[in-house]
Every structure is written in C-alpha cells, then in structure tokens.
Amino acid sequence: KKIPWRWVPPPPPPLYDTDGNKIDAHGGQIIRHEGAFYWYGESRKGLSAMGYPVGVNEGWTNEGVNCYRSSDMLAWEFAGMVFRNTSVALGADQPGPYVIERPKVVYNAATSTFVLWMHLDSFSYTYRYAGVATSPSPVGPFEWKHALHPNGHESFDLQIWREPGTEDAYLLRDTDGHAWTMVSRLTADYTGVEEEVSSRLKGPCEGIALFKDLPGDGLHYLVCSYATWYYPNAMQLHRKAGGLAGGEWEFLGDIGDGLYSRLSYNSQPTFVLPLRNATSGELVPVYMGDNWNANGPGGVGNASYLWLPFERCAEESCWWDWRPWRLPWQEAWMPRQVERGADMTDWLY
C-alpha cells in the first residue's frame, strides 16, 4: 500500500568519513570496545532485483555490512566491509544475492568473539531468517555461522541488547507477520537463543531500539516504528519494569505532538546512544534513525541519518504530555556536535 507523501523537515546533511566519502552504515548500531567506537551498518542500498518499482522494499539490497571506527565519535575512519552478501551460505534451494538488514554486533568476553546478527531474507521476503556470523576482531572479517528462525518463529527487523553490568544478552525481533516483537535471551556464546521466549509485545514494531534509564527509574524503554515499508510513520514508545525476562510491556503511545514529529521527522529508529549528562550524571539517550527517503520517495539508496537527543519530560516542563520522553526537533544536531568538538564518548553503559 502506497503511503501518501507529506512534507517533513529537510533531510539531515550527510556524514562523511575521514577520507571524505559518505558514511553508509544503515540500520546499524555503535559499540564501544577498548577505548574505540565501532559503527556497523548496511552498505549503500541498491535495486538489484529487476521488475520492482523504486520505493518498494522488495529489490533493495546491499553488498554487505560496513564498519567505521572512531576514538571520539566525531571523526569516523572506514574500517572496511566486514561481512559480504556473498559470504552467506544457505542451501542450493535458497540462492543469493540476499537482503541483509539491521546488522547488530555484540562482544562476548567469555569467548573473545564479536558476534554479528542480521535480518537475512530473499528479495520477496520469504526466508525470514536471523543470520549469525562471528569474528575475533571488531573489524572482521566476520565468518558465516548459520541462519535460524529463533524459537521457531520467523524473524524480520531485529536488535541485540546486552544488559548493562552483566554478560546477559537478548535478541529482540519483529515476527509472525508483524504481530509480535519477541524477546529471547541469547545462549552463552551469543550465537543462538535459549528455548523459551523471555517476553513479547504486540506489533507491528520495526526498527527496534532500546535504552535503560540509569541511574533514573531503572526501566527499559523501547522505541520502534509501525510497518509502512520505507515511508515514515509515528514512533512508538514502550516501557518495561523488572528486566527483559518475564512480565508485561507497557505501551506509552506514539512520540510526537505535531505533524513532523508524528512522522518521526522522516526517519526510522535503529539505535539509542546512552550518553551521560556531564553536569547531572543522568542519561541523555541520543536517537539514531535512518532517513530512508532523504531525496524524497524512492531515495532509499541515498539515505542519510538523523541523530537527536531525547528530552526527559518532567511534569513542570511537559505538563500536557503523559509520556516520560520527548524528541524535540533540532536541525542538523549531529553535524553541529562535530563542528564544535562535543564530547560524545562519555557513555553510561
């Protein structure tokens, strides 16, 4: 179903690496390891399947997963394509090239291994796998491990979460035709899931991203989008007490109090940076989103990024809003942090 195009704020300016090339790391996330930061994401998308119109998600694919490295979160060096589409090894009845989306990397200290999870699919989105690859180095190359339907369910958009201060890690994924988002604890080596689903929330819920309010209320917050292909829609906000295992998720409504924010400023969530406020020590969650239609409908191949800090919604500042977090618009927020040399390295977890 085609979603009518509406005007939203202009796309953020592109971010460039230290060689002057446009950063292509879409649908990904950033990890911190031994004083360095690694930004993983999909390489530039292209239409590789003939017969599909521009702007429809079937047919958009990429060569693999890119990695960028930084010591300050401001200047990013291209570390290479750490996993390639051609590295996927499925059976002869499921040939490539494949759709690779939402690459997420987690470090397993017990095995000294970096584990890459991704949504792996066919152009017609019939495989619905979670794919796994591993590497002893954060800059790869990652070696193909396997594809799976976690807990026997199909897998679309996914996210990996490691609980702060522990080695417990979880897979969250959109599943069952967008009916549910399921949460499963990873096995000890992080390459599979335990037998039981830990918790679930009602879908649709694409572009999953989490943060934990430390040292605030200690609750987990989850943002995600609805399912409208690459067209923008409202951003959902969910909350959970008592950890990710067991219990119920609480839907807090859609973030946004105007037309532009109700369309997530033409973006879709991918990750939340857990920055620390230098004065108060409180969490400053920084939203990372993909601006898929940066050049209007069908501009997926030229996608850019939206970075914005969430704002804690205290009663005195947001008395009209029942949601604990807001995402007010700030034009070119991340490029301005680069220009002024802001400290982006002080993470809470």
Image (tube, rainbow, N blue to C red):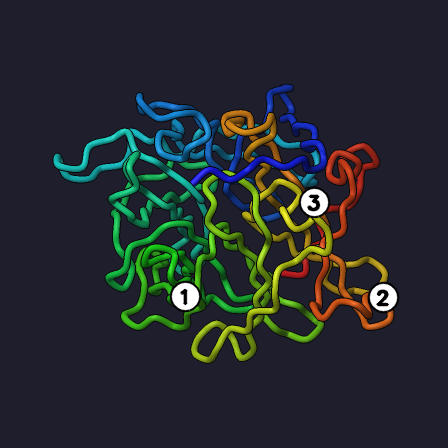
Q: Along the horizontal axis of the image, is 173 left or right of 50? A: right
Q: Nearer the viewer, mark 1 or mark 3?
A: 3
**Where residue 330 sits in the image (x, y, percent)?**
78, 43
**Where residue 267 sits in the image (x, y, percent)?**
60, 42
Residue that appears at 46% across and 54% down:
159
Is the residue 183 above or below the residue 21 in the image? below
Mark 3 crowdedness (10 Å alpha carbons): few <14, some 14-19, many ≥20: some
Q: Are marks 2 and 3 in contact (CB under 8 Å)?
A: no
Residue that appears at 39% across and 24% down:
47
Closer-to-camera residue (157/140): 157
Q: Nearer the viewer, mark 2 or mark 3?
A: 3
- Mark 2 and mark 3 lie on one chain; the one further toward the N terminus is 3
Q: Which mark is residue 260?
A: 3
Q: Nearer the viewer, mark 1 or mark 2?
A: 2
Residue 31 visible in this rendered orientation of the protein: no
Residue 299 visible in this rendered orientation of the protein: yes
Q: Along the horizontal axis of the image, is 129 left or right of 68? A: left
Mark 2 crowdedness (10 Å alpha carbons): few <14, some 14-19, many ≥20: few
Q: CA distance from mark 2 to mark 3?
A: 21 Å
- The residue wearing badge 2 is 317
Residue that appears at 44% across and 75% down:
245
Asked which quadrant contains residue 97, the reply is: top left
The C terminus, quarter of image: bottom right
Q: Amino acid at mark 2?
A: Ser
- Mark 1 and mark 2 lie on one chain; the one further toward the N terminus is 1
Mark 2 lies on a secondary structure that is: loop
Q: CA distance from mark 1 to mark 2?
A: 33 Å
- The residue wearing badge 1 is 183
Q: Amino acid at mark 1?
A: Val
